[in-house]
Amino acid sequence: MFITGSTGFVGSNLARFFRGRGDDVSLLVRKSSDLQQVNDIKDSCKLYEYDGSYKSLEVALSTAAPDVVIHCASLFLSSHNKNDVSNLIDSNVKFPSMLLEAMSQVGITQFINTGTSWQHYKNEDYSPVNLYAATKQSFEQVLKYYLEIKKIKAITLKLFDTYGPSDNRGRLVSLLINKFKSGGRIDLSPGEQELSLVHIDDVVGSYEKSIFELTKMELGIHKQYGVGSKETYSLKGLVNKVAEVIDVDARVTVSWGGRAYREREVMAVWDKFICVPNWKENRNVVEYIVDEVVKSRD
């Protein structure tokens, strides 16, 4: 298989999982890519360099000749300024469009795309939370062309928030774990927004199941699945639940409202999705946070 975005959190865990089970794994990287996330497996994978050109993509795909392309690469920005627009479009629309063209030219037909639940603000069929989500939707419109000319078949997995070991992105779960370990003050929003948090092992499982599903599909078919948690929490409910279980003392002070809600904050998560067939969530975020904090006290 051929993975884009392998130096990111999701992509690196996918590469590690599939390499660990003995698959041939090819990784597309830039010359400037930080390979720290895949240091332990990079020597057992095939690395191909993307230099920004279409030609480098076609050469990489024709040489690697994978059965399936898993597209995880993206530029994620929760908010943007005027200088970010070009980079968002280049990373999230232009690059994957060139990837599809290269696939069609060399005869690779199976494609797994990574989308976001943020394409569905207020549970709409399409309403982007931010420009990042809008670029994800824009690429799906390009994808539709390659589907209609029957050059590929595709599955799009729309991810919610992810968490797990070695997550250095500074996201909520890591922030909470570090604060519950160290103590002190933490500034959070008023905390009424709903959260769907999925462990990276379960996210990887959704890709594994999708590959099997993809093999049964005909050219021109596109299926879309959400990868969300069975149980959702408000931010305040999540923090209070963890604090209750681990009996946090006065070392941790939460300032609710210390941060403002973001523009177009997702107050209720998208729930009009179906899961990948035979996929199930095995991990729970409260249990994960509690385990990580308790381990640090042993």
Image (tube, helix red, strand yellow):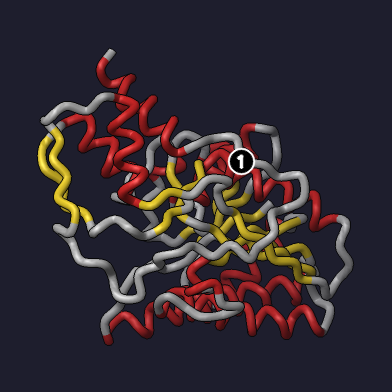
Q: Which residue is mark 1?
A: 281
The quarter holding residue 155 reads: bottom right
46 vs 140: above or below = above
10 vs 248: above or below = below
**Res 7 seen here:** no
Name the spot of residue 238 as percent of width and height, x first. Answer: 36, 43
How many numbered marks have been drawn onto this rendered protein structure? Answer: 1
The quarter holding residue 159 reads: bottom right
Name the spot of residue 263 as percent of width and height, x first. Answer: 30, 75
Name the spot of residue 251 as percent of width and height, x first. Answer: 11, 31
Residue at 18%, 61% in the rendered image: 259
Q: Residue furthest top?
A: 298
**SS at badge 1:** loop
Q: Where, quadrant-wise, is the C terminus in this rendering? A: top left
49 vs 86: above or below = above
Task: Return the residue nearer the eye: 179 or 50.
Answer: 179
Task: Return the residue nearer the eye: 290 or 69.
Answer: 290
Task: Return the residue nearer the eye: 246 or 139.
Answer: 246
Indicate left or right for 115 with 273 as reference. Answer: left
**Res 208 seen here:** yes
Indicate left or right for 228 with 82 as reference. Answer: right
144 vs 251: above or below = below
Which amino acid lies under the numbered mark 1 shown in the image of this protein? Answer: Glu
> Quick one: label 1, few (<14), some, or many (20+) residues within 10 Å?
some
Residue at 22%, 29% in the rendered image: 181
Residue at 27%, 87% in the rendered image: 82
Indicate left or right for 94 with 266 as reference. Answer: right
The quarter holding residue 289 reads: top left
